[in-house]
Amino acid sequence: AQSVTQLGSHVSVSEGALVLLRCNYSSSVPPYLFWYVQYPNQGLQLLLKYTSAATLVKGINGFEAEFKKSETSFHLTKPSAHMSDAAEYFCAVSEASGSARQLTFGSGTQLTVLP
Amino acid sequence: DAGVIQSPRHEVTEMGQEVTLRCKPISGHNSLFWYRQTMMRGLELLIYFNNNVPIDDSGMPEDRFSAKMPNASFSTLKIQPSEPRDSAVYFCASRRDSLTNEKLFFGSGTQLSVL
């Protein structure tokens, strides 16, 4: 069984400040981990993914995430927030093995960027 | 490619009516997912098809919900009869299964309001 916990349903940062969105997972097998972003009135888009290669993963729009097995975490960061980063962010996990490889999503974190 | 196409974008209906949501996955993708997004529960996987066959429907909330995938290019999610608590955004997503490609492509969603 797999699960994802996103700490903080709402995060506010000032423009130019560091963005940190937290994600912890549990999985009985080596996981694949993902961050998706949802802009208003749109579907989800993949930001980045970890699939057992490098533990520091770089994604689009300047975001990156680091896989830390000892902490079962996959936090999303961006050094400097931009107004256009305001959106909802979802962390997701899937099992790296097995035929189903379904994604389990966290409950989401709404990011607000203040001017 | 036009991406995952869902219709309608918005649906307003009265309690007790039948609702049919439609999805056209990306050509060549062999897995299709239906998700429901609510404020209370975030993103929930309802059902997952692989090669047009339902693999896991454990997320379908009740017998009032049914989903079909008659061919590789079309799927429907039907609610009959609909209830106010079914109000949510319903997302369809598709993916081409491979050993390493886990990327899900989402449609823009159908906003369902049951009065």
Image (cartoon, grey):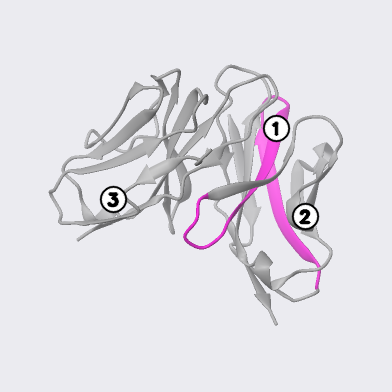
Tell me the distance, in whole angstroms, between the alpha carbons under discs 1 and 3: 31 Å
Residue A45 percent coordinates (x, y): 60, 48
Q: Is disc 3 on the same chain as disc 1?
A: no
Circle 1 sits in a helix, a strand or a loop, which is it? Answer: strand
* Residue B34 place in picture, x, y as percent: 41, 37
Quadrant that contains the C terminus of chain B: bottom left
Q: Residue furthest bottom?
A: A115
Mark in front: 2 vs 3:
2
The disc labelled 2 sits on which kind of residue?
Answer: Phe
Instruction: Tell me which corner region of the image, top left, top right, bottom left or bottom right, holds residue A97.
Output: top right
Q: Is A36 placed above or below B39 here? A: above
Left or right: A60 in relation to B56: right
Quarter of the rendering containing residue B22: top left
Name the quadrant containing residue B54.
Answer: top left
Foreground pick, A3 / A97: A97
Residue B104 x, y percent position in the rendering: 57, 36
Residue at 52%, 24% (x, y): give it.
B28
Q: CA distance from mark 2 to mark 3?
A: 34 Å
Residue A63's tag is 2
Q: Which residue is mark 3?
A: B86
A54 over A11 or under it: above or below: above
Q: Residue at x 42, y 49 (%)?
A: B109
Q: Amino acid at mark 1?
A: Tyr
Whether residue B32 appears in this view of the structure is: yes
Measuring from the top left, give residue A46's x and y in whole percent: 64, 45
| Pointer 2 and pointer 3 on the same chain | no
Q: Which one is earlier in the sequence, the residue at label 2 or at label 1? A: 1
- The crowding category of the residue bearing disc 2, from other C-alpha atoms within 10 Å (few below 14, some 14 to 19, many at least 20), is many
Task: Residue A32: give its label.
Answer: 1
Above or below for A16 versus A9: below
Chain part drawn in magenta? A17-43
| Chain designation of label 1 | A
